[in-house]
Image (cartoon, rainbow, N blue to C red):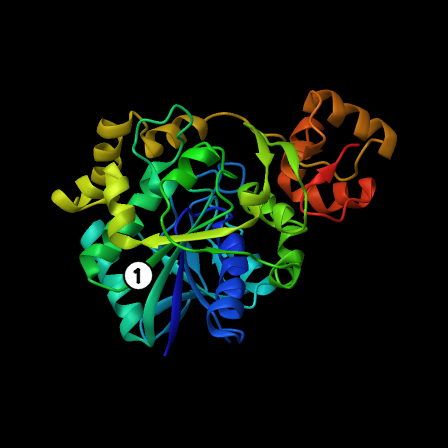
Amino acid sequence: MSDLFIAAGGGGDPVGTAITAATVGRVLTGTPLGETTIATYAWERLEVDPTPGPLGCVHFTGLALQAGIPVITPITQPIAPAGSTLPDLAADLTARLVLLDPWQGLAAMADQLRRLVDAGHDHVRIVDVGGDILTHGDEDTLCSPLVDALVLAACRLAGVPATVYVAGPGTDGEIPQADVLDRLDGEALTPLGQDVAAIRTALSWHPSEASALFAAAVDGVRGPVRTVNHRIPLTDASARVHSTGLDEAVAHNTVAAHLLAAPPPTLEAAADLSAKLTGLHELDRERVGAREPSPSARAALPWTEQAAREVIRAAAQGAPYVTLRFAARALGLTWRQIPSLRGLLGAEGAVLALV
């Protein structure tokens, strides 16, 4: 038997979850966990996937079915016009990536999790990078409450034993770090550089910002980092993983509690309920955003290193660090050009130092 990790936030959370899994294996068991299974949504930024909402099983070709469980492999491909970073993550992470499909509602997600546990996992470890999984629903900077709430509610409905981990409190910019820490009552684990080592290849190209900030904090970066939407301070607490119980997390998460009170039959119904509680409708927001043009990729970077750094520094407005996604955006590049930008700037860390 082994543990099942769930990357609760979609996007780049599988990267931060892989760091957390390595830390849990080293600290709690004293040995690596072996092959780690990470269940994750295929719900990513519109610049990665221009189609609104998450991708389900019907949106991929090449999924490997193992005991009826959809596994993402390097040969898995999203069906155009959809896009996904998960097949490339499957190539670069040592973990087995399992697709969570929320389209059929909460009960169906709970069934997915029961099947995963029955397939050989005796404990569920839910990982959220940043901490919006503990949202009360009324935070001014809240952006994406639904995905995490669905995981909490599905685990409770499935009746599976679960622990909730917040990796890098505050690094997603959705709830201030101090508020996240006030809502955590479990032990704190301290990742080491060796726990980050296995995901460095993925971080060299992935546009994740929260997981990149978490990794940067583990590597010792301290101070404000400019992301696309926020200026986020990295502190000693940003480099830790905090745990709490499933019941305690549900008690904080207003959306999860309401999902359990009246389990929605579809993802659309769940999004409607979340919107009534928080004012944020994540499907409608992406439907609007999908109509907006995005930057087109360039074959080559038309800057010298000095010129590029000057543009990035001006956009950063005094921040000593920026994410590579922010740097690419400042230069009018797409996330796919991050590796070329790293090469131009000689950037090797999880974030780019400007001083």
* Total residue callouts: 1
- Judging from the image, what secondary structure is the residue with disc 1 in? strand
The residue closer to the viewer here, 242 or 199, is 242
- Relative to residue 140, is residue 93 drawn left or right? right
Position of residue 283 measured from the top left corner of the image (x, y, whole percent): 34, 34
Q: Is residue 71 above or below residue 138?
A: below
Q: Residues within 10 Å of mark 1 (few under 14, many from 20)?
A: many
Q: Residue at x 46, y 32 (%)?
A: 176
Position of residue 348 measured from the top left corner of the image (x, y, whole percent): 76, 49
Q: Residue at x 47, y 42 (%)?
A: 130
Asked if residue 87 shows in the view, the reply is: no
Choose top left, top right, bottom left or bottom right for residue 317: top right
Position of residue 241 measured from the top left corner of the image (x, y, whole percent): 48, 52
- Looking at the image, the residue that sits furthest to the bottom is 1
The residue closer to the viewer here, 23 or 115, is 23
Q: Which residue is mark 1?
A: 162
Q: Residue at x 23, y 29 (%)?
A: 277
- Relative to residue 315, is residue 293 drawn left or right? left
- Looking at the image, the residue that sits furthest to the left is 262
Choose top left, top right, bottom left or bottom right for residue 253: top left
Say what amino acid the circle numbered 1 marks.
Ala
For the C terminus, which image quadrant?
top right
Q: Is residue 62 above or below residue 208?
A: below
- Relative to residue 40, is residue 346 drawn left or right? right
